[in-house]
Image (tube, grey):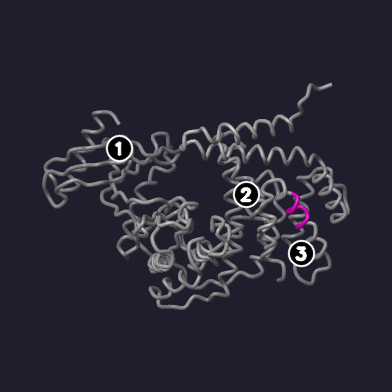
Amino acid sequence: MNETERTALSAFLASAAGASRATILDLKLLSGGAVQENWRLDIDFADGPFAGAHALVLRCDSPTAGVAISHGRAEEFVLLKAVFAVGVTVPEPLWLCTDRSVIGRPFFAMRRISGTAAGHVLVKDDGFRGDRVALAERLGAELARIHSIRPPRADLPFLPEPEGVPAQVTIAAHRAFLDRHHTPYPALEWGLRWLERHAPPRGEVTLCHRDFRTGNYMADAAGLTGILDWEFAGWSDPMEDIGWFCARCWRFGRNDREAGGIGARSDFYRGYEEVSGRPIDTGIIRYWEVMAHVTWAIVAIQQAERHLSGAEESLLLALTGHIVPELEWEILRMTETD
Amino acid sequence: MRERPDPLDLVVAVRNVLKAKILPAVDPSLKMDVLMAMNALAIAERQISAGAAPLEAERASLEALLGAPADDPVAANRALSARLRQGDGDPGKPDRAALRAHLEAVARARLAESNPRALGKAAG
């Protein structure tokens, strides 16, 4: 950011924080992507309710992002507000700026959290994420709080209306993708047919994170510090999130710990049930674990396509395509008998 | 004649250099990139070694299942997909066992190239 932008930024934040003056102590680009940018910001407010130094992160739409996602940060901010309000552990969202005259694009400020999100680190047997049983239980409790948000919500109009049976809606979307993709995937068709035959009827529809798994939360030695990556959130069957979290493909090699590679299912379920006040129908979780494998396979194909199409040369994206056969294998194994 | 070493030899040689010399010496921030590069070369190595045999086996199996030539793998797999989607692989259907056997054989061959370690893991 240039001097003009920094000045405009500190003026905006001072006004938002009710301070007469804000001093930027440090401002560094953390990561830049095609859709968004994260800036590490240390700022000092001279007075007002936020007087003193604060460790923040600015989330901005990428400078090259088109008009199509111009509401990206604004929507994410509202979503974070909604889940923060019901006690979900997320970086506290503070101020949203949609005025492009400040730094040229929309952004919001949130508190900075510490720890690591790296799945292969979190599943290791060291003190990195605190006590495993406590973490699994805590994550169950967090998920139940997310699921306490029900439609309709006037503050979340950008989430598509929850119409139809959630499982069937997802199956139809996956089939539509496979029909327009250049390569057919018969093993995934097998899985989708199984999912269609076993689809649970529409029950209660809630806010779902839809990517709630090890790798998408941050933890430090004391435990959970925040749930991240809300871009797929939407209305769906809450059991979808539980299946996604427990699915074998998200255990980072620790298959013995069926809850996200970090804990026992019983720990995770207990935390969920204590907050939701309702027992989990464990019979239906297998269904959503099959769905998790099929959905992750479709997403992996889409990620690999970004590399294959030449849109974004990336070894990571290229290798993501080679995860698909393992997911197919697991789908066939899980759907063998019925 | 083509000059040797052939592609398989070259890929193996590069992977060995990465493993023996580059990986131990590289800055920790680049370690993940080197590991990804080694993994990509290992996949290439297995695909080159396997040659056309898995594709030929898939074609023969598709022809038996579909009762038609399967020279175009995309078209044949689309036809197979359509049959699975309409329920030909459902429990009680006459072709269920044959369809299932085909899918397992193809999945095993694909996994043997992409990530053979998972074959052992999935069995356990």
Residue A101: x and y in percent read 27, 35
Q: Which amino acid, by three-letter code, is at mark 3?
A: Gly
Q: Is residue A43 left or right of residue B86?
A: left
Q: Contact (CB < 8 A) between labels 2 and 1?
A: no
Residue A37: x and y in percent read 38, 40
Comparing A41 with A197, the one in front is: A41
Label 3 vs label 1: CA separation? 55 Å
Q: Main secondary structure of the magenta part?
A: helix
Do badges 3 and 1 share one subunit? no
Provide the residue designation for mark 2.
A323
Residue A105: x and y in percent read 33, 38
User: Which residue is located at x 42 percent, y 68 percent?
Assistant: A137
Query: Badge 1, how many Cα within 10 Å: few under 14, some, many 20+?
Result: few
Tell me which numbered mark, 2 or 1, is placed earlier along the sequence: 1
Comparing A325 with A302, the one in front is: A325
User: Is residue A83 in the magenta section?
Assistant: no
